[in-house]
Amino acid sequence: MKKICILTAIVLLLCGCGTQQTYETVSDEPVLNVSAQPREIVLTLPEETLLPAMETDTGTLYLCNGFDVAVQTLEGGDLERTVRKVSGFGSAELTIMNTIAGELACYEFVWTAAADLGEQVGRAMILDDGSYHYVLTATAPEEKSGEYQEIWNGIFETFAIA
């Protein structure tokens, strides 16, 4: 009798240990997260700049006299991914200067890379508003990159988002 009472007490105690059933509801309309809209990029290019050579959903490539300028809007949140996409290098392999431009984080760096026609020098600036990375990139052949330094400084000084 004592064994039956103990066994009944254990069974009653374990009955309360069951899992609670979870219900999932389904609606006809998908629930979308509200995300910030990308802002407009503003910059001044040299007068001899050709019309945009190529446009995509994320950016535009401009052919200038001897160098190229690319403007892109990429998804924010992962600076490492953006730096690698722009330069081909990880942030540990580059020296990245981090400053604040108003309410935006600003990252600048340069790199060199081998290309079909020889060494290329690239310079990039990333403006981060917390939702998007706004990227300005300028590339030129290494032997002529010194000639474009003042032009590039002018372009990068005017780079902003509205």
Image (cartoon, rainbow, N blue to C red):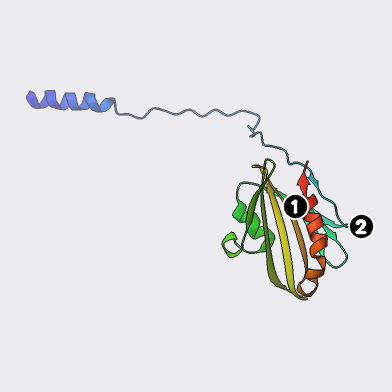
* Residue 101 appears left or right of 68: left
Spatial separation of the CA atoms under disc 2 and disc 1: 21 Å
Q: Residue furthest left?
A: 1
The quadrant in which residue 95 appears is bottom right
Q: Which residue is mark 2?
A: 47
**Structural crowding at the residue carrying mark 2, measured as other residues with C-alpha within 10 Å and reported as few (<14), some (14–19) or many (≥20):** few
Along the line of sight, which residue is nearer the eye, 95 or 115? Answer: 95
- Which residue lies at the image location 75% right of the left edge and 52% below the top edge? 72
Q: Position of residue 133 (x, y in %)?
A: 68, 48
Q: Residue furthest front?
A: 150
First along the sequence among labels 2 and 1: 2
Task: For the C terminus, give its image quadrant.
Answer: top right
Numbered-mark total: 2
Looking at the rendered structure, the secondary structure element under dot 2 is loop
**Structural crowding at the residue carrying mark 1, measured as other residues with C-alpha within 10 Å and reported as few (<14), some (14–19) or many (≥20):** many
Q: Position of residue 88 (x, y in %)?
A: 65, 64
Q: Position of residue 81 (x, y in %)?
A: 62, 55
Along the line of sight, which residue is nearer the eye, 100 or 136? Answer: 100
The type of residue carrying mark 2 is Glu
Q: Which mark is residue 72?
A: 1
The type of residue carrying mark 1 is Gln
Looking at the rendered structure, the secondary structure element under dot 1 is strand
- Which residue lies at the image location 73% right of the left edge and 41% below the top edge? 38
Q: Position of residue 115 (x, y in %)?
A: 73, 73
Mark 2–mark 1 contact, CB under 8 Å?
no
On screen, 62 above or below 24?
below
